[in-house]
Image (cartoon, rainbow, N blue to C red):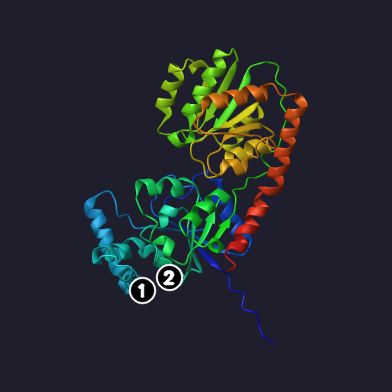
Amino acid sequence: MKTENLHIKTIGLVLSYVPGYSETFFKNKILGLQKSNYRVILFVDYKKPDDYHFECDIVYAPKLYGNTFTALINGFSSLIKAFILYPKKSINLYKLDKRDDISFTHRIKNIILNQFLFTKSLDWLHFGFGMHAIKRENVACAIGAKMAVSFRGSDLYLTPLKHNNCYDLLFTKAVKYHVLSQEMKQTLIAYQVNEKLIQVITPAIDVHFFKNKSVLRSDKNLRLTTVARLHWKKGLEYTLEALSLLKKQGIDFTLTIIGDGEERERLIFAAHQLGIIHNVEFKGQLNHDEVKEHLQNTDIYLQYSIQEGFCNAVLEAQAMGLLCIVSNAEGLAENVLDGKTGWVVPKRQPKLLAQKIEEVILLSSQEKQNIREAAISRVRQEFNLESQNKAFAGFYND
């Protein structure tokens, strides 16, 4: 009687840092794969003192930054380890890079930088963001693994603007791509990537945690919320401009902005100049329970981004039964169905955003309820963790 060979596939996930507490999409993916009988190893470029604990093996890259002497010692050590402990993988990478006309110096650098990826036997090497695959285009082939790359938004739309032609070599390789939206899939196809190699797996949320809970408020103050990193791509200055127009119309409101980032000071000053500083609350970074509490006391959720891959926060708001108004940036128009589960407004047009908020305020209670129910139903059916986990489990079956 033959014994079936039950090979447990091992997925190597490459990220810059161990995901933080709030980056639940990576945590959920890893847990989902483990439940589907995959082994997951996290490869991380940089170690932080407050790294969030993950229930999987973590392999850190050697420290090749900071103190010059330390970086040189670690680099030389990595090179020696590569050729002594992993000679076949090192030589394979060297030859593959040479075939791509990569200079001798950069071939050696690539071996040093990627030596930590040689340390495990993998079935798949999956780069969590597109930029993680730059200068690593040949590593998966060198170690005998299949290669996958996820694009999540800014890595596809902004990184090529800062680093011209950075993905040219990647797009010539045998890679399976994961993207968050049909819009992103079409962008990759425009780069001449074979559409059969692209799989759309949308973000998902814990629909059992983010459940609708009606909170009756006695005051007439309109409560709006945005959850976003304080970065220019989130379009928060346009949001503030729109709300300054509402204030001039005599509409009383409070906007709560949850999140932190490099634009905080500029946005506070913008709110001051626009005359709405007393209407805007900058809450900083909050945990999930605190975010949920704020959403429970929100009338309208705003995500007026300039660039957005998809946005989990919008899914969470819809699951909570909030009226959501978003921009038409990339995946947001797939996240929210205009006029059915919320409203989509062209980006960078604060007057149109202000008009849409006024329109939503004036809707009848039944019209608002219809939108809420449609949003809740769609998120629960299409964006739950169970569906996402099943999709990722199938992603690695090729």
Asked whether the viewer can see residue 54, the reply is no
For the residues bearing labels 2 and 1, Cβ distance under 8 angstroms: yes
Residue 3 in view? yes
Q: Give the x, y percent position of residue 288.
A: 59, 37
Q: Quadrant of residue 44?
A: bottom left
Residue at image position (35%, 73%) is 85
What percent of the width, then of the height, locates residue 229?
A: 48, 36
Q: Is residue 386 left or right of residue 9?
A: right
Q: How many marks on residues? A: 2
Earlier residue among tags 2 and 1 = 1
- Identify the image quadrant of the N terminus: bottom right
Q: Which residue is mark 2?
A: 141
Q: Amino acid at mark 2?
A: Cys
Residue placed farthest to the right in the image?
366
Residue wearing tag 1: 92
Give the answer, above or below, for where 63 lies relative to 368: below
Looking at the picture, tell me which residue is in the foreground, 378 or 229: 378
Q: Quadrant of the C terminus?
A: bottom right
* Residue sticking out furthest to the bottom: 1
Tell me residue 104's x, y (percent).
Answer: 24, 67
Bin the neighbour count of mark 2 within 10 Å (Cα to Cα): few under 14, some 14-19, many 20 and up. Answer: some
Give the amino acid type for the residue marked by disc 1 in the picture. Asn
Q: Is residue 87 left or right of residue 143?
A: left
Local packing at callout 1 (Cα closer than 10 Å; few below 14, some 14-19, many 20+) is: some
| Picture layout, residue 37 above or below residue 307 | below
Q: Residue at x 40, y 63 (%)?
A: 137
Up the image or down, 166 lies above or below 298; here it is below
